[in-house]
Amino acid sequence: MPNQSIGYNNSSTLNGFALASKGVSLQDTTSGEQNTRENPKIETLRYPYNLKIDRDTDYLDIKISKYEPPGLTIGKPGTNEFRNFPVFESFKKGDNETPEAFQGRINKEVAGKLAGGVALSTGSSKNTFERPHTYICLPIPQSISDSISVSWGPDALDPLAAFGTGLTAAALDTKTSAKAIIEGLALAAPKALKGQTQAIIAAVSGAAYGALGGNVSATSLISRASGQVLNPNLELLFNGVELRSFPFTFEFISRNKIEAQTIKKIIRSLKKSMTAKSSSTTDGLGIFIGAPDVFQLSYRRGKSPHPFLNKFKPMALTNMQLNYTASNTYATYADGTPIHIQMSLTFTELNPVYSEDYNDDGIGVGF
């Protein structure tokens, strides 16, 4: 099918996102353009190009900033400063403070911060967006959602394992013989297991043989010996936290040449920011590659955070897909810009969400 080239249209409404006929311009309501006046190196991009924002206009604000590594070095006790610690900028030793007292004070302060939940924000969440290099403002997609989850899993601890753990620890300290451990386990067993010495010995022997590579389990041996199985005391236990991902889909239909160029810049900026930095911009030796940029997203209404929708932690752009024939046909404007572009982005947060994150201003549903 031959290429179809047409002229731009100037519709005032695009993809259900109505442009406000009255109101203040975007550059007067976001910090992006204000920073641009102070620092011309900051790039501000918005779609639709002539987007006007009033106090009731909802939109998605994206800030892009250089990734700041969390750092690993804490420092050595007795030195004058503790540097590069993710939570505290520095610690200074007092003139008359002994190294032991200094270390004790550090431990106390760190413990206090941990108790207060401050340390839950790890180094990677400390990436500041006070100096972003790019602002992008887009309409809120037609389909948005958020989800939050934690990891729980089943775990079993039978009586023999419980008693054996303590006895084994004692054996390591006192060099108690294996026979003494088994006899002690039988003596320490609850009343329901009295008289089941052979079953207990079979279970311990099976566990030991299985640890050496044999295809025998303690459960099968104790079942053979006594016709019973141990109570597994099965329980669901907390395993850890999980990171959240957010997929977004945006539709681009340019109505004039300036807007077509803006769409191209938005796509290029996102692609460039999500990719790793080559050695020419890091060490110059080809040994390392630098991390991509990080993103701070926020739903906004006018100048303020959205009064209901969820918040985001700093994120990485992990996947980007572009469909230049979103209307299922190849057609471009006269300058080669595809008429209908669909952009799908997947962001993943750098840090998990904790309960303490909800101790904020109470705006909206939180994270």
Image: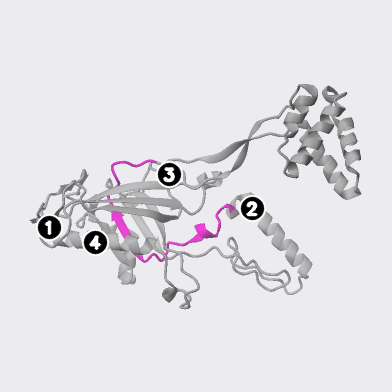
x, y percentage for residue 249?
30, 47
According to the picture, the residue beneath numbered tag 1 turns out to be: 333
Magenta residues, start to end? 120-145
What is the number of the mark on residue 10? none
What is the number of the mark on residue 264? 4
2 with respect to 138 (left or right): left
113 with respect to 269 (left or right): right
- Mark 4–mark 2 distance (CA, rounded to whole Å): 45 Å
Furthest toward the bottom, the residue is 284
Q: Could you say whether the residue bearing mark 2 is in a helix, strand or loop?
A: helix
What is the number of the mark on residue 363? 3
Q: Could you say whether the residue bearing mark 3 is in a helix, strand or loop?
A: loop
Magenta stretch secondary structure, dominant: loop
According to the picture, the residue beneath numbered tag 2 turns out to be: 114
Front tag of 4 and 2: 4
x, y percentage for residue 103?
74, 65
Is 125 magenta? The answer is: yes
* Amino acid type for the residue under numbered disc 3: Ile
- Mark 3–mark 4 distance (CA, rounded to whole Å): 35 Å
- Mark 2–mark 1 distance (CA, rounded to whole Å): 58 Å
* Amino acid type for the residue under numbered disc 2: Leu
Q: What crowding class fits label 3: few (fewer than 14 Cα within 10 Å), some (14-19), or many (20 or more)?
A: some
